[in-house]
Image (cartoon, rainbow, N blue to C red):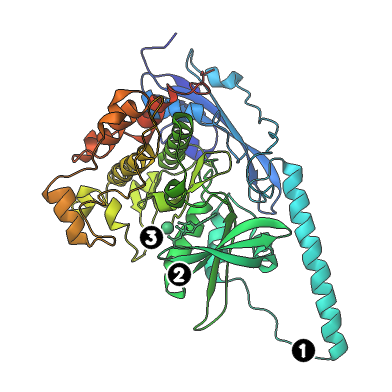
Amino acid sequence: MRLSRGLRCECGGASACPDGAANGTCVTQPGGYCFVAVEEVLDENGFVVLDRTSGCLPPDESGFMQCKSSQVPHQHPKVIECCYNEDLCNRRLQPRLPSPPPDATEGPALRPAAPSSPTLLVAVALCVALVAFVVAFFLLLRRRRRGCKRPPSPPAPAHLQEISSGSGSGLPLLVQRTVAKQIQMVESIGKGRYGEVWLARWRGEKVAVKVFFTTEEASWFRETEIYQTVLMRHENILGFIAADIKGTGSWTQMLLITDYHENGSLHDYLQTVVLDTHSLLTMAYSIVSGLAHLHMDIFGTKGKPAIAHRDIKSKNILVKRNGQCAIADFGLAVRYVAERNEVDIAPNTRVGTRRYMAPEVLDEKLDTTNFEAFKMADMYSLGLVLWELCRRCATGDKAQHVDGYALPYHEHVPPDPSFDDMHAVVVGKGIRPPIPARWLAGEPLSTLATLMAECWHANPPVRLTAVRVKKTLAKFRSDAPLKLV
Ligand code: ADP
Ligand code: MG
């Protein structure tokens, strides 16, 4: 039974107890939830420890989705349980971390940044430290023999010290740097506007290495910072492994090492692959799940800030071997700092991709002090990605129909459209991508057609949220709605 008044909950951890909370308890708004979250975090020595937080969650969708969030498989070991039947009901909750699932289908087995068990992380860290020690020992021995003395190596760059100290996600700095030193580049697999991506090997495993152009230090810094945000890991967000920056003076090399996905970007994949409705739904649902996780804030001492991507497009989404997608390229992302009610925008000259810019961005009317505005702009771009996906989904019984791959607005603007080209089409004429009649003839394309139109609405507050799109798509999936405690 739901209480019509606010619910009193036990709260633990400074930031899980709001201002004015008395005796370690807080009160929700009517319809809210009490929660307990348990997660594995790294302590200052790099060891995995269990962290428990409890407190109040808001009513409606946002609280509900946070309660559900740990039931969506995460690479990061954490679990949240909620209750709402009586005051202080969360005192009795004892969430347990799930045992690590076997991961036979998904990419490289290497997952040092989110090991599936504490032992694995300790083992990886110890192995790396041991190898580093042995290598250092032999180098020292050789140098001694030759009688040559080199100046001591410089301390870790200030950027990396800063990033690694405050964050609770990712490998310890020393291990990250060791990983970066041990990779062997194999071949270049992609070029974006801000860097070149390489297939590389780390101890026999395939990894992807993004080498940032020397002028793009701010993008490297931002992307590294975002990947190391607490609770950022999710199966539909590209898995971060390590970051490193080397060099002095005029020469700097900035690296970002992530999981490698051999299918490449969604943009490249859709050129050649035709989807059936099942694979279409798997892709659409996974993309929106990744975006919902990114947009969501999770309260608690080790909570996750809400993040907006600001460059959602098919080239920044990767296709995994299991048919799901992972969102990548966080060089432009912004975070919402709840304590100060501020949007944390990186000091970065980078702008999003013009073709995918929301009308309010093209019109330079987006209020950069309002975090919700960034999320709404992401939803516009997501609508365009859903359109790209649906075109490649075959329909019809005997004769199958499918549209060729096309970029949104391909028939209205040149290949590299200017700001003015896009403004004239999207704002001036209010044009949106065409919905072919075949999509409206059956499900799930018909629902997806409605969803995308509600995502690219000219008026940002009218657009759907990622959580709403996810819920609607969940109806078509057998493995979705999950029950609350
Ligand atoms: P940029 O910031 O320069 O746009 P991205 O991170 O978007 O760089 O990567 C550029 C391209 O490299 C992507 O569109 C994709 O084709 C390829 N790519 C990036 N990361 C990976 C990865 N982890 N696995 C496989 N291909 C990748
Ligand atoms: Mg990119």
* SS of the residue under disc 3: loop
How packed mark 3 is, by other alpha carbons closer than 10 Å (few <14, some 14-19, many 20 or more), is: some
The residue that disc 1 covers is: 149
Q: Image point 46% across, 37% down: which residue?
A: 283
Amino acid at dot 3: Ala
Q: Quadrant of the N terminus?
A: top left
The residue that disc 2 covers is: 217
Amino acid at dot 1: Lys
The residue that disc 3 covers is: 346
Q: Image point 27% across, 50% down: which residue?
A: 369
In the image: residue 430, left or right of residue 42: left
- Marks 1 and 3 sit apart, C-alpha to C-alpha, by 41 Å
Furthest-bottom residue in view? 147
How packed mark 1 is, by other alpha carbons closer than 10 Å (few <14, some 14-19, many 20 or more), is: few
Furthest-front residue in view? 398
How packed mark 2 is, by other alpha carbons closer than 10 Å (few <14, some 14-19, many 20 or more), is: some
In the image: residue 280, left or right of residue 461: right
Q: Pointers 3 and 2 in contact (CB under 8 A)?
A: no
Residue 470 x/y as whole percent:
41, 30
- Marks 3 and 2 sit apart, C-alpha to C-alpha, by 11 Å
* SS of the residue under disc 1: loop
In the rendered view, tell whether residue 27 sits above or below residue 339: above
Amino acid at dot 2: Glu
- Marks 1 and 2 sit apart, C-alpha to C-alpha, by 32 Å
* SS of the residue under disc 2: helix
